[in-house]
Amino acid sequence: YLAELGVHLCSAWDYLGEDRSDEGVELCRRALSLRAGRTRAQRPQSELFLAAALTERYEQGQDSRDADEAEALLRRLVRRGNPIEARAREMLLRITLLRRDGRP
C-alpha cells in the first residue's frame, strides 16, 4: 500500500494544487526497500509503481532524470511478460510522447 500511496501523492497537484511528488517518489522507494516489497511476487509491482511516480513527477516538469530512471525500470519489466509487460509498454509510450512534446 505504501507504493500506491506514493503514486497518489504524485498526482496531488491535479487534485489539491500542491506538489507532493518528491514525497510520493520517496514512499515508492521505501516500499521497495521493505522486505515485503522485495519479494518475487511484489517487486515487479512495486517497481511499476515507482516508475509511475517518476513519470508523473517528470510530467509535472521536473528533472529528465526521472524519465530516464523510469524507462530503465520499465525496460526490465517488459522482459517479465504479461500482465506487467502490457502496463510497462504503455508507460514507456507515455514517456516517449512526453519527451516528444518537449518536456525537459
Image (cartoon, helix red, strand yellow):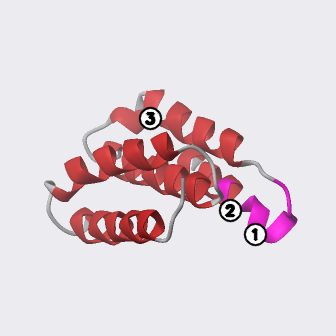
Numbered label tally: 3
According to the image, label 1 marks what residue?
14
Crowding near the residue tagged with mark 2, few <14, some 14–19, many ≥20 C-alpha atoms within 10 Å: many
Crowding near the residue tagged with mark 3, few <14, some 14–19, many ≥20 C-alpha atoms within 10 Å: many
Viewer can see residue 13: yes
Q: Which of the 4 quarters of the picture holds residue 78?
A: bottom left
According to the image, label 2 marks what residue?
11
Q: Are marks 1 and 2 in contact (CB under 8 Å)?
A: yes
Q: For the residue labelled by badge 3, is the local secondary structure a helix, a strand or a loop? A: helix
Residue in the image at 42% along x and 37% along y: 37
User: Relative to the observer, which residue lies in front, 65 or 7?
Assistant: 65
- Tell me which segment is drawn in magenta: 10-18
> Mark 1, mark 3: which one is toward the viewer?
1
- Most extreme residue toward the front is 102
Task: Determine whether, in the image, residue 102 is placed left or right of residue 36.
Answer: right
According to the image, label 3 marks what residue?
32
Q: Is residue 14 magenta?
A: yes
